[in-house]
Image (cartoon, helix red, strand yellow):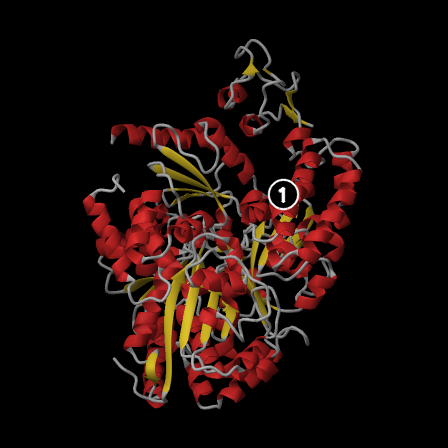
């Protein structure tokens, strides 16, 4: 199948769209079973669930009556694995293999809903059948995630049936200048975290005079605790390809490169497959849709280096070298891949572009705030009830994110902090919860938007330990090219090690401040410049925790090993030996049923395994 | 280069040839070799250099820069402990310590019998499964410290049989 013109594609897309609608509305006379193919659900057994469905449908001779598809991530990972069934649009949560026969018999065959698997609102006890009605989805708006969790990513016709390539067709009817002007007017800012106006980047590259130019999609999502880009690449790769082609048209590039982490094999496979399908249909290659526009897309794999998320490091990596950043200028828009003008845009940014072209800048600007229009995808993780992938209009507050969408803190514990911006960001306390989320507000509050990781911490998390965690990460990932980052991050980590081991002094605060200032002002790239942010934000917002470590030699959250002591309360010990049996270093002694158990303090490695094993809360942690 | 057998060498050249049209193919070549053979020792780096005319120091620089490449063989079971933030705040540090303690190796190392390697992973993107551990690609969800010994034993047993 080749689409020779825009008209040809529109005609076919209308057909695909009708076919999709027929599936969801049931007018094709069948039930459609959608399984969530996100990482969370897959690790929970989506594959086995699918096999079991096929088996049961066959056993009950229902294969004609139902079709099963694995689609992209539904978002609410903590309630997965999911099974969503159309046309009734009922979603079953926390499904396991053993539930499938019942679903097939009751729902598919008899048309009766299996109520026990329907989501229950934890506050009201009300049963909620439709996914859209979950509180989790109420404040969300899907722009970058358009089509994700709905279409089958391996079927290009479904993507085209959901407005795929409409944005490019619109762009091709405009002049390149009008396209970058539209993106500039939309106020779209780089979703990788930097927040640089996308349209401005395009304008610079368009103005660079060169016979060769490149568009690069930055899919080197390295922020630990963030997987938005992976979801978009896996669930609707065609949208990103479309965004890339639009960028190519706007700046006059004919080649595009995807740079994707090697840790994301599914994303790599899906993007490659989507490129191939697009080429076969005349949506990529020479003379796209008969308009005379040529654009080719390629895939390059990262090989495990966080610093390659920095654009000059990334370009060096595509060119087969060590992914070490270089100083700018020249900016890539002037001299990038192989010395040619290049723009580097994040996955989510490119996935947002087709929407802007389809719906216009006014519609896009109706979401979000004046200076940060549109939406942002976050990976909400950590100690919230609803862990998952969310897309919210900018301007939603942190409180709404944590409590309304996230459903509050797990196990009724108390909120302590929300960390955004990953290793370059900061941890914000309760007092900052009413901050409306946008690029500028997050910086003003002492953190940053970042690429979209949002990790919630409760009172069991030690903020000094969190700062140490990030500093360890940055120390490992520093490329070593410039001394302030290479040496500074190591020295800062040593200070934090000292504090968490109980050997800290008040002078350590001054030393951290000094090292932070050196790193910030002297490092070559953003990795070093922002390396101290996690420390500075935790010192600023949680100073009393640092003081407890340094002065009182105590870790209030009982996390830092050097400051924690495990012992057994003889009053509560039932002499069951459960602790002694699980101790990996065998230092808990006692006779089952006769004497209470005792931990050898000299040899205890403070792993905490005994705490989990004891049924009687007899292990004292102090 | 004496240690590489002819079949492996032929395969390495095939991999190099498959990227003949690319401007800067080095990382793609090395990724394929890593995937196929599990490691890229110095004599393989030399073989690639000789065939592609990319200098050995440049190849060595790339191999040592990226965590995906290894110069030593990994164990039969590669245990990847996710140390992304979501896993970390849910106790992933304790999980990886426990694996290290029981197996007697540091993250990045391999046991003497070649059965297990431990890798500290940056983020699997399986935050709902936190703390998550992968063993040869299979994800184990919400792992608790007291389950670690059992997990190792299960793999050790199946390793003994094969």
Local packing at callout 1 (Cα closer than 10 Å; few below 14, some 14-19, many 20+) is some
Residue in the image at 62% along x and 23% along y:
A618
Position of A212 compared to A190: left or right?
A: left
Front-lying residue, B126 or B160: B160
Q: Is residue A528 visible?
A: yes
Query: Residue extending furthest left?
Result: B7
**Count of marks placed on residues:** 1
Q: Is residue A460 above or below residue A168?
A: above
Q: Chain of mark 1?
A: A
| Residue under the point 58% across and 19% down | A603
Give residue B47's position: percent from left, percent from top. 29, 49
Q: Which residue is mark 1?
A: A490
The quarter of the picture where residue B89 lies is: top right
Between A180 and A612, the one nearer to me in the picture? A180
Instruction: Determine the residue located farthest toward the top in the rendered image.
Output: A594
The residue positioned 74% from the left and 63% from the top of the image is A444
Q: Give how far across and how far down residue A408 sits, in percent.
A: 63, 52
Residue A472 in the figure: left or right of residue B127: right
């Amino acid at each position: 199948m080749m689409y020779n013109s825009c008209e040809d594609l529109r005609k076919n897309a209308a057909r695909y769209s009708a076919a999709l609608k027929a599936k969801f509305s049931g007018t094709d006379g069948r039930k459609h079973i959608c399984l969530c193919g996100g990482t969370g659900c897959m690790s929970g057994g989506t594959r086995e669930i699918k096999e079991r469905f096929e088996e049961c449908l066959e056993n009950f001779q229902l294969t004609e009556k139902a079709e099963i598809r694995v689609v992209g991530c539904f978002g609410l990972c903590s309630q997965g694995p999911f099974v969503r069934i159309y046309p009734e649009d009922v979603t079953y949560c926390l499904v396991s293999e053993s539930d499938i026969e019942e679903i097939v018999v009751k729902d598919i065959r008899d048309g009766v809903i299996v109520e026990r698997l329907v989501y229950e609102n934890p506050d009201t006890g009300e049963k909620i059948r439709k996914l859209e009605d979950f509180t989790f989805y109420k404040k969300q708006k899907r722009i970058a995630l358009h089509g994700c969790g709905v279409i089958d990513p391996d079927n290009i016709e479904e993507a085209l049936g959901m407005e795929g390539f409409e944005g490019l067709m619109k762009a091709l009817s405009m002049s390149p200048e009008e396209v970058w002007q539209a993106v500039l007017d939309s106020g779209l800012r780089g979703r990788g975290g930097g927040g640089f106006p996308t349209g401005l980047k395009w304008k610079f590259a368009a103005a660079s005079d060169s016979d060769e130019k490149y568009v690069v999609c930055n899919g080197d999502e390295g922020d630990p605790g963030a997987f938005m880009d992976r979801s978009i690449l896996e669930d609707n790769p065609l949208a990103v390809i479309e965004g890339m082609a639009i960028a190519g048209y706007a700046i006059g590039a004919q080649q595009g490169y995807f740079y994707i982490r090697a840790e994301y094999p599914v994303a790599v496979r899906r993007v490659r497959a989507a490129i191939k399908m697009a080429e076969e249909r005349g949506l990529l290659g020479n003379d796209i849709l008969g308009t005379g526009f040529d654009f080719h897309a390629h895939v390059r794999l990262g090989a495990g280096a966080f610093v390659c998320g920095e654009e000059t490091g990334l370009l060096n990596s595509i060119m087969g070298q060590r992914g070490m950043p270089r100083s700018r200028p020249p900016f890539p828009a002037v001299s990038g891949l192989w010395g040619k003008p290049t723009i580097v845009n994040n996955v989510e940014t490119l996935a947002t572009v087709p929407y802007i072209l389809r719906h216009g800048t006014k519609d896009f600007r109706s979401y979000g705030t004046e200076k940060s229009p549109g939406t942002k995808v976050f990976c909400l993780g950590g100690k919230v009830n609803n862990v998952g992938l969310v897309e919210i209009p900018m301007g939603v507050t942190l409180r709404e994110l944590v409590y309304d969408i996230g459903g509050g803190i797990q196990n009724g514990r108390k909120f302590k902090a929300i960390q955004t911006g990953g290793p370059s960001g900061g941890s914000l306390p309760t007092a900052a919860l009413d901050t409306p989320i946008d690029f500028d507000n997050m910086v003003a509050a002492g953190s940053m938007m970042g690429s979209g990781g949002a990790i919630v911490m409760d009172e069991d998390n030690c903020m000094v330990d969190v700062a140490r965690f990030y500093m360890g990460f940055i120390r490992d990932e520093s490329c070593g090219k410039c001394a302030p980052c290479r040496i500074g991050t190591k020295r800062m980590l040593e200070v934090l090690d000292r504090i968490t081991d109980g050997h800290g002094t008040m002078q350590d605060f001054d030393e951290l401040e000094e090292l932070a200032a050196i790193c910030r002002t002297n490092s070559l790239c953003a990795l070093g410049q922002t390396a101290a942010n996690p420390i500075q934000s935790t010192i600023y917002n949680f100073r009393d925790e640092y003081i407890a470590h340094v002065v009182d030699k105590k870790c209030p959250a009982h996390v830092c090993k050097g400051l924690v002591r495990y012992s057994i309360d003889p009053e509560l010990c039932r002499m069951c030996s459960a602790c002694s049996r699980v101790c990996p270093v065998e230092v808990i002694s006692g006779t089952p049923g006769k004497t209470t158990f005792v931990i050898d303090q000299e040899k205890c490695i403070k792993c905490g395994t005994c705490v989990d094993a004891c049924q009687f809360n007899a292990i004292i942690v102090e | 280069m004496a240690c590489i057998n002819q079949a492996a060498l032929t395969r390495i050249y095939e991999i190099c040839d498959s990227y003949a049209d690319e401007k800067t193919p080095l990382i793609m070549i090395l990724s394929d070799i890593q995937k196929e053979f599990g490691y890229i020792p110095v004599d393989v780096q030399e073989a690639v250099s000789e065939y592609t005319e990319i200098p050995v120091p440049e190849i060595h620089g790339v191999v040592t820069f990226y965590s995906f490449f290894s110069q030593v063989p990994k164990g039969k079971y590669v245990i990847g402990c996710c140390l992304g933030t979501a896993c970390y705040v849910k106790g992933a540090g304790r999980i990886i310590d426990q694996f290290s303690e029981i197996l007697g190796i540091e993250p990045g190392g391999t046991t003497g019998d070649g059965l297990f390697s431990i890798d500290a992973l940056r983020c699997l993107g399986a935050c709902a499964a936190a703390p998550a551990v992968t063993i040869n690609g299979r994800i184990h969800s919400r792992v608790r410290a007291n389950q670690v010994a059992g997990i190792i034993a299960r793999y050790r047993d199946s390793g003994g049989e094969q």
